[in-house]
Amino acid sequence: MIQQWPSIVARTLALAKQLLNEIAFDRTIAVPAQPVLAVDRAERFENRAVVDEEIRPDCVGRVRFHGTYWNARCDLEIVLPRGEIVCVVGQENITLVVQPL
């Protein structure tokens, strides 16, 4: 347990820095990646994201997920407009797979 403290402290400081930047300067900074979502989590809104850049069939768009921006695609033949709330159902490398709610 003691060996884990440096990584816990580093992660806590990174999250605090991100929060302060978002509050004070209304901007988002990248935080080191953590394992992305287990889809079966019990939290109600844990897998929700907001479309920031329109997602079209066979094209990658962008979503805001947990305070950071991610490339995103949808396997359905629909257009997801900017501002729509979507459900994150998976991840392939650095791209999230989303579906409409």
Image (cartoon, helix red, strand yellow):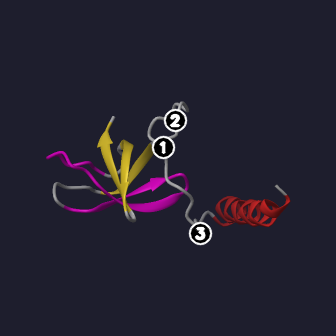
- Splitting the image into 4 quarters, where does residue 71 fall? bottom left
- Splitting the image into 4 quarters, where does residue 62 fall? bottom left
Specify the amino acid type for callout 3: Ile
| Near-viewer residue (37 or 53) | 37
At 18% from the left edge and 45% from the top edge, which residue is drawn?
Answer: 76
- In percent of width and height, residue 85 lies at 38, 42
Q: Which of marks 3 and 1 is nearer the N terminus?
A: 3
At 44% from the left edge and 40% from the top edge, which residue is drawn?
Answer: 39
Question: Mark 1 falls on what kind of element?
Answer: loop
Does the residue at mark 3 contact the one at mark 1 (Cβ under 8 Å)?
no
Specify the amino acid type for callout 1: Ala
Q: Give the range drawn in magenta.
A: 59-81
Comparing marks 3 and 1, which lies closer to the viewer? 1
At 16% from the left edge and 54% from the top edge, which residue is drawn?
Answer: 57
- In percent of width and height, residue 94 lies at 40, 65
Question: Mark 3 falls on what kind of element?
Answer: loop
Asked whether residue 66 is drawn in magenta, I would say yes
Q: Residue under label 1, please give it.
A: 38
Q: Which image quarter holds the C terminus?
A: top left
Q: Residue under label 2, please give it.
A: 41
Task: Using residue 60 as the reference point, say whether residue 87 is left or right of it.
Answer: right
Label 1: how many Cα within 10 Å (few below 14, some 14–19, many 20+): few
Q: Is residue 42 above or below residue 70?
A: above
Does the residue at mark 1 contact the one at mark 2 (Cβ under 8 Å)?
yes
Question: Mark 2 falls on what kind of element?
Answer: loop
Specify the amino acid type for callout 2: Arg
Does the residue at mark 2 contact the one at mark 3 (Cβ under 8 Å)?
no
Q: Distance between the residues labelled 1 and 2?
A: 6 Å
Q: Residue under label 3, please give it.
A: 29
